[in-house]
Amino acid sequence: MENIVHFDIRENKIDKFDEIVKLQTLPNLKRLLYKGNPFESKIPNYLLDTINLMVRLEKINNIFVTK
């Protein structure tokens, strides 16, 4: 799994942001799509939290991450 660059987990009923946190172990992950999961309504700053956790990401939900 360490070669994953693009990961699409949209609308997968992911309820806890902790499941997203686990993705930081993917060293080559550059693009992450996770829109439409229940954790979004529970974590007000989930996008910012994701950016801070996974500094290598270039795009989240098709939005470019700028440093």
Image: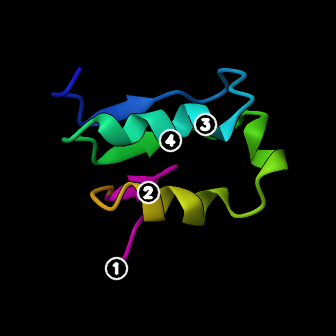
**Tag 1 residue:** 67
Residue at 34 percent across and 79 percent down: it is 67
Disc number lying in front (1 or 3): 3
Q: Main secondary structure of the magenta part?
A: loop
User: In this view of the protein, which residue sits in the foreground, 45 or 35?
Assistant: 45
Judge whether 1 appears above or below 34 on screen. Answer: above
Q: Secondary structure at mark 4?
A: helix
Point out the stretch of residues depicted in magenta.
Answer: 58-67
Taking the image as shown, residue 4 lies to the left or right of residue 12, namely: left
**Tag 2 residue:** 53
Between the C-alphas of marks 4 and 1, the distance is 20 Å
Split into 4 quadrants, where in the image is the N terminus? top left
Residue at 44 percent across and 57 percent down: it is 53
Res 63 visible: no
Res 34 visible: yes
For disc 1, the neighbor class at 10 Å (few under 14, some 14 to 19, many from 20) is few
**Tag 3 residue:** 18
Q: Amino acid at mark 4?
A: Val
The quadrant in which residue 5 appears is: top left
**Residue 33 x/y as whole percent:** 49, 40
Q: Amino acid at mark 2?
A: Leu
Residue at 78 percent across and 61 percent down: it is 44
**Tag 4 residue:** 21
Give me the disc on residue 3: none
**Are the residues flagged by discs 4 and 3 in contact, CB closer than 8 Å?**
yes
- Disc nearer the start of the sequence (1/2): 2
Residue at 23 percent across and 29 percent down: it is 4
User: In this view of the protein, which residue sits in the foreground, 20 or 7?
Assistant: 20
